[in-house]
Each structure stands twice: as structure tokens, then as C-alpha cells.
Image: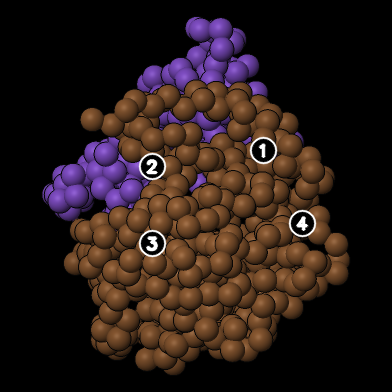
Amino acid sequence: MSAEVRITAEPIDNGRCKFLVSEPVHAGGVRRFASPDEARGSPLAEAIFAIPGADVSEVIVSGNLVTVVKRNPAPWPAVGKAVGQAIRVALAAGLPAVASKPAAAGSATADDVLYERVADLFESQVNPMVARHGGRVELIDVQDAVVMVRMAGGCQGCGMADVTLRQGIEAMLQQHVPEVKGIVDITDHTAGSNPYFAAAKK
Amino acid sequence: MLRPYSPRLLLLLPTVTYRTVAFVEAARRLGVDVTVASERPSTFERANPTGLVTLDFADPAHAAVQARTFAYAHPVHGIVAVDDDTAVVAAAIAQELGLRGNPIAAAAAARDKHQQRQLLAAAGVAVPRFELRTIAADPERLAHGASYPCVLKPLRLSASRGVVRADDPPGFVAAFRRIKAILEQPDLAECGDWAGHVLVEEFVPGREVAVEGLVTQGSLRVLAMFDKPDPLDGPFFEETIYVTPSRLTRTAQEDIAACAQAAVRALGLREGPIHAEIRHNDRAAWLIELAARPIGGRCSGALRFGNGGSGLGAGMSLEELIIRHALGMELPTVEREHQASGVMMIPVPGAGVLREVRGVDAAQAVPLVEEVVITMHHGQMLVPWPEGSRYPGFIFARGDTSEAVEAALRAAHARLEFLTEPAD
């Protein structure tokens, strides 16, 4: 592990913030934790749920990206610094920050079925649509009926990416796979080098 | 089972706006149905015809007809615009559909700096002396008739693009030619008659503030007053730091608020957000510009409404407040949080292709700094003012006092390093 772990916070809104870490936090796909109970055995997720006063409701870890969702409406600074500290401590411990995804139980099987249906939808409809703007949407995982996606190409960093996510992909999921409970974008949009629509101050 | 009633918001989002996430996520938090309208079609429009629609933003009357057709099938209960052009479109649609909004003429006058000046001057609002000039005119001749110092500006460009101060006739000629070159760029030259003119106005010295407000039935509520601690004396007018609350005297702030209210009245604005730039000196509060839209870029991140706790309205964003107003929903609060807050629009460090930004972590580590957002992508061209209008990013800070927030913003900025390469 290198000496300095660099972490960039990218709040999406008051409730949701992405933390981009300069080194991988979890290499084994995506892990989503929706409660402290689910976080047991994953030191990083445990530490984030335990941040006092944050009222964290969800932690998603994928590669070098940690997404945190909180209920407390206060702005991110205090919680953000505590999350950064938790990430640094977890990486410094030299142990897996996040446990591997448990082998199939009942809910995992349901997620596997959902994954297949969502993957079909992405291949047959979603990706042909975004491809018209040079974009691509990768299905990363489905956990507890929540779909995790990463955007690439013209979608990554695009000024309208959130419209594509909410009004496009999420709406299609509601229509075709209504069992899906939500969608999470784990894209590092700041790294997009060729967005289809680039924003300007107006 | 019947779905609970949810009002539908028509959100006008140009494809180049920074405001997409803030408004879309705010609408989701409020649980309203959203239809996003843009000037270019989404690739999902056929798949989600209730959630996406293409409107002719270049022709507000046509957009209103399109919106009426849409609303027959999907009733619309409120409309929100995010920039100067869509503010006029929103006014046309609001009139067509009978929604809360501004008169079209008022929104159009707010968009056009010359029309705005004429209306304000006629109503007795303090504005710089001004003259309209065509870009076909001989600048050397115009320069001899001008008073100095003066400011030359296009009629509609945003973010102070093309705004240049001149202190003497040679400076006037140089500024005029520079603005003419901007306005003759293909993407602007086709935009209409306004791109063939330049406004020449008196330079007004003084402290400049930005006023963020919400108009209801013609009455302005000031939501926040931002100091701009870096003097905006030219030759170009790139914004840098905004900090609220203002450190101006109470009397000065009252003068500024009264000036903004008088401008709202003079323009005939009735409903929705406004963003005004006002200068204050020992003679008066001078209305420099007033737009019928909220603050631009990512700057709204500096504003939060409500204080503490987790009750209704605590930590409410400006976008939530605007959407609530547009839909006639209850406004739990319009009180800004107690903390001081600020944003720095990171200055363009020089012309070139952006290759790397260093020091972001160090900047974020500065006490009181909440966020450093680099919005430009590697490989993008950095274009300095007056030709440019895109900031490479934004820094946000909060603290107990405006002084502390300003110092934190400056300290964070000092830690950033932009590596660029000359353009080919």
C-alpha cells in the first residue's frame, strides 16, 4: 500500500456522496450494505455505519469507489471527513476492508434472477439507446433488488447523465423489471474524458 | 391500487447546464413526477414519453405549443427553468398552460441587457448610463464619443463572457474588436439580432454583491446576499469568490434589497427565482444585472435553508425551494442556515488543454472546506475570460464567519495546481 491514500469526495446531494479512493478498496465486485447487521464482518462498512450522528442507511463499495447514503440532512463535511478516516484506517489495517459477497442464500438467488433480467434489458434496449450518444452502461451488480451501474463513453461525465439514469434507465427498469427497488450509479463522472454534453456555467 | 396523487413538474434543462443533478435529485426527494424537457432529444424519449420531451428552446412560442400538446396527455402543474433562455421559454409555457410564472415580456427583458437597462432606467432604478452600439460600427469613431472608464458587453452572454472594461479610446477599440470576434463566432452569429450589438455603459465603482431571491406575486424575498470580496474592476469580469452572509452594513444591505425589489417591479417579474448583481457605493445601489433564474454553475451548493434537526425543511436546497414554489407546495422555511458559507469559482489559470489537476486532496484538507469539485475534464480546453465562460471547478466552504470561509477558500485554491499543454 502506498504511503498516502488520496480520497476525493463527490456529493451527489445532501443524502448521497461518492468517495473516490486512490487505491482499490474492494476488488471482488460490488458490495452493498443496507444496515449495520449486513455490514458485520466488513470493517470499513461497520465503521461507516458507526459514525456518530450520521444515520447512515447504505454503503456501497466497488473497486476504488465508496458510496455512502445517510438520512441526516446536514451537509457532508463532518460525515465526509469521518468516512475518509474510516477508509484510511481500513486500508492501513492490511486486512480486507470488505468481506466477499456471501454465497447464495434465498435473497441472493432472487438477485441472481433479477440480474439476468436486468442484463437482458441492458443488452437489448438500454445500451443500444445510449450507444447513439457514444455511451455505454455497465450492469455491475444487483444486491437486495438494487441495481448498480457504471456509465462509460459519452455518458461518463455527461451533463445529462442523471437524466439518462433517472428518466431513462430507472424508468425502463420500473416498467420492465418492477421488482427492482432502486438504481445506484457508481460512476466516477469526474474522470469522463469525452462526455456527450459538457456543462458550462449558465 | 391507485397511485397517490403526485404533481408533475416540467423541468427545462438545456443539455449544457451544470444544474441537472441538483434539480433532478431535488424533485425526486420531493416525490414529484418530473418531465425533463431539453432542446435536444434524449435517446430514451420514446421509451419514457411522460418523463422526457424535446422542446424548441430557440422559439418560446413554438415550445409553448409543444408543451400544450404534451400537457393534454400528461397534465403539468408547475414549471422550472434553470437559465436565461429557458426562463423565457418557461414564461411562454406558463402562460399557455396557466401555470405560476412570469409574463413573457418580463422574462425576455431580464434576458436582454439593453431592454433591461431601458426598463430599469425608465422606472428610476439606478443603472449605469448606457448606449447600444452595432458591431458593424467603426470602433474608432465610437471610441471618441465614449466616456471613460466604460464597460462593453454583449447583450445576452452569461458568466461575464465578452464583458470588457475600457479606460481610454485605444482600450475601447481593442475591447470592441475582441467582443465583435466573440459575437461573430458561428454558434453566436446565428443567434439573432442581439448578437449584432454591444452595450456600452458607464463603469460603476463599488463593492459588488450577488442577490439570490424568490419572487411571489411580484414581491421579492431575499434568500441570500453574497459578498464578492475580489474587486471586479476589470479589464475582465471573471467571478471568483461568493461569501454569505454579506459583511456590508445593514443599511447597505437594505439599499441593495430595495434596489433588487425595484428592479423586479420595473421588469414586471411575478414569480420564481431571481439572481441579481448589484454594486454599492456612496452614491447608491446600482443594478448591474438581474436574471429571472437561480444562481448559475454549481454555486447553489453554497446555499442551504433551515437549521439543525431533521424536521421538514432542515438542510433544504435552493432547488427544492424553487420546485416547491413552482408547484405551489408549502415552503417549510426560506431562512438560510446560520453558518457562513461560500463558493469559489476556480479561476482559469491560463489558456491550454487541461492535462492534470494536482493538490485536490490538499485543498480538501483545508479546515472548513467541504468540497473541491473539478468540473473540467482532462483534455478539455481552458479558455480565459473574456472569450471563455467555463470555470475549471468550484470550491465550497462553511464556517462560523464569512471571514473564515473566505480565508479557507483562498487557502484551498492556493493548493491547487493546473497542468496544461498548449493547444495544437
Q: Amino acid at mark 4?
A: Pro
Q: Are marks 2 and 1 on the same chain?
A: yes
Q: Is residue B154 left or right of residue A11?
A: left
Q: Residue at x 23, y 30 (%)?
A: B424
Lower sequence index among marks 4 and 2: 4
Q: Which residue is mark 2?
A: B383
Q: Amino acid at mark 1?
A: Leu
Q: Tell me the subunit letter for badge 2.
A: B
Q: Amino acid at mark 3?
A: Glu
* Residue A132 image point, x, y percent: 15, 51
Give the chain ID for the purple colour: A
Give the chain ID for the brown colour: B
Camera sees residue B393:
yes
Camera sees residue A33:
no
Q: Which residue is mark 4?
A: B245
Pointer 4 local density, CA inside 10 Å: few below 14, some 14–19, many at least 20? some
Lower sequence index among marks 1 and 3: 3
Q: Is residue A51 left or right of residue B78?
A: right
Lower sequence index among marks 2 and 1: 2
Q: CA distance from mark 2 to mark 1?
A: 22 Å
Q: Which residue is mark 1?
A: B409
> Of the residues tagged 4 and 3, which is closer to the observer?
3
Q: Tell me the subunit letter for badge 4.
A: B
Q: Are marks 1 and 3 on the same chain?
A: yes
Q: CA distance from mark 1 to mark 4?
A: 15 Å
Q: CA distance from mark 3 to mark 2?
A: 27 Å
Lower sequence index among marks 3 and 2: 3
Q: Residue at x 80, y 72 (%)?
A: B254
